[in-house]
Image (cartoon, helix red, strand yellow):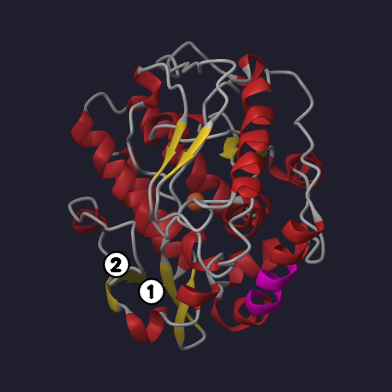
């Protein structure tokens, strides 16, 4: 989930995908998925079109402290799934990943812990949307299946990426009603932890939100703002606003803080402790855009809005500011 880490893959030809430790979602993926038919190019800058070095034996390089670093089978698996995304071309069917029983087991185990927490800690808009999308909690859904559910509702769909894309690319795709999604599963030895956003984060944290008019309006506002951001300062402010809302937003509901952000909603460790473990400070978009964040650990400071509506209105108004 860090969406929001600008690693500049859009400016270079990456030969592999570097994975750095971070327990929060770092957007991974090589952007070869621009759906040209859905892009309005009249008033938007060109989305960077990274390429990749075809034929690399090791597509995904894990850092030595990644839980799967020593696991050859896992590394091979990551490469296989990365290759599927890299081979994807606009207009193709979204590639199917044939998940193993181990991968399905990790998914089930996470859901067993997350589902009860969603009942008590997730905001109303998320819970309502999740009831509509109703992800299978026993088997990992395919992106194509999820798209069949969400696209007819409000137009959003999820397309595969293999590795890191820049925050700019990620956000600009949101403006085209496309969410760039990884498909690999975290390492089975540490189901509670992922150093990067995996299929659990993408589907549990984000997919359901595309059935929510409020969430979709926010995603589109971020996409529009990214299109119109013409300097690094503006992009950094958008990045921070996304981080503290769409990934780690909290709102007051039913007498307590409820999670809005996908980073919280997909992490049962953090979802179960944010109210007591983080410093909850009043929601202020002008302060948020000046606040840096650490994607490598639980968030020490979260901004809590008095309601989802207030959060959405303030964020959209801030995004529309020049
Ligand atoms: Fe995310």
> The C terminus is located in which quarter?
top left
Residue pointed to by mark 1? 306
Question: Is disc 2 placed on a helix, strand or loop?
Answer: loop
Compute the Cα span from label 1 to label 2: 8 Å
Taking the view exactly as shown, the residue that stands out farthest to the top is 42
The verdict on residue 109 being magenta is: yes
Q: Between 123 and 294, which is closer to the camera in this rendering? A: 294
Left or right: where 112 falls relative to 297: right
Our reading of the magenta stretch's main secondary structure is helix
Q: How many numbered marks does the figure carry?
A: 2
Q: Between 261 and 154, which is closer to the camera in this rendering? A: 261
**Residue 172 appears in view:** yes
Q: Determine whether 279 is above or below 5 in the image.
A: below
Q: Mark 2, residues whose alpha carbon is within 10 Å: few (<14), some, or many (≥20)?
A: many
Q: Which disc number belongs to residue 283?
A: 2
Q: Between 292 and 131, which is closer to the camera in this rendering? A: 292
Q: Are marks 1 and 2 in contact (CB under 8 Å)?
A: yes
Question: Is disc 1 placed on a helix, strand or loop?
Answer: loop
Residue 273 at x, y percent in the picture: 43, 82
First reached walking from the N terminus: tag 1 or tag 2: 2
Q: Residue at x 51, y 39 (%)?
A: 220
Range of residues picked out in magenta: 108-114
**Residue 322 appears in view:** no
Q: Determine whether 194 is above or below 117 in the image.
A: above
């Amino acid at each position: 989930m860090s969406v929001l880490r600008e690693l500049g893959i859009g400016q270079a030809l990456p030969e592999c995908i570097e994975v750095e430790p971070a327990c929060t979602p770092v957007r991974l993926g090589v952007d070869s998925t621009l759906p040209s038919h859905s892009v309005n190019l009249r008033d938007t800058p060109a989305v960077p079109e990274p390429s990749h070095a075809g034929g690399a034996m090791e597509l995904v390089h894990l850092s030595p402290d990644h839980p799967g670093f020593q696991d050859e089978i896992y590394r091979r698996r990551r490469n296989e799934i990365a290759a599927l995304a890299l081979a994807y071309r606009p207009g193709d069917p979204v590639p199917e990943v044939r998940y193993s029983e181990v991968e399905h087991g990790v998914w089930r185990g996470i859901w067993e812990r997350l589902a009860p927490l969603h009942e008590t800690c997730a905001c109303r808009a998320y819970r309502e949307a999740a009831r509509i999308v109703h992800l299978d909690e026993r088997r990992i859904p395919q992106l194509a299946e999820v798209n069949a559910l969400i696209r007819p509702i409000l137009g959003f769909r999820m397309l595969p990426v293999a590795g890191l894309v820049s925050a700019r690319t990620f956000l600009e795709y949101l403006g085209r009603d496309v969410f760039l999604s990884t498909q690999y599963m975290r390492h089975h030895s540490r189901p509670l932890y992922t150093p990067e956003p995996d299929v659990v984060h993408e589907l549990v944290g984000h997919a359901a939100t595309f059935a929510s008019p409020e969430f979709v309006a926010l995603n589109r506002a971020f996409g529009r703002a990214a299109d119109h951001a013409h300097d690094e300062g503006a992009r950094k402010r958008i990045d921070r606003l996304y981080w503290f809302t769409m990934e780690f937003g909290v709102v007051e509901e039913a007498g307590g803080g409820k999670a809005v952000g996908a980073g919280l909603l997909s992490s049962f460790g953090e979802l179960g402790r944010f109210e007591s473990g983080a410093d909850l400070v009043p929601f202020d978009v002008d302060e948020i855009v000046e606040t840096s964040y650490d994607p490598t650990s639980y968030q020490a400071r979260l901004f809590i809005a008095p309601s989802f509506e207030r959060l959405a209105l303030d964020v959209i108004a801030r995004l529309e500011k020049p």
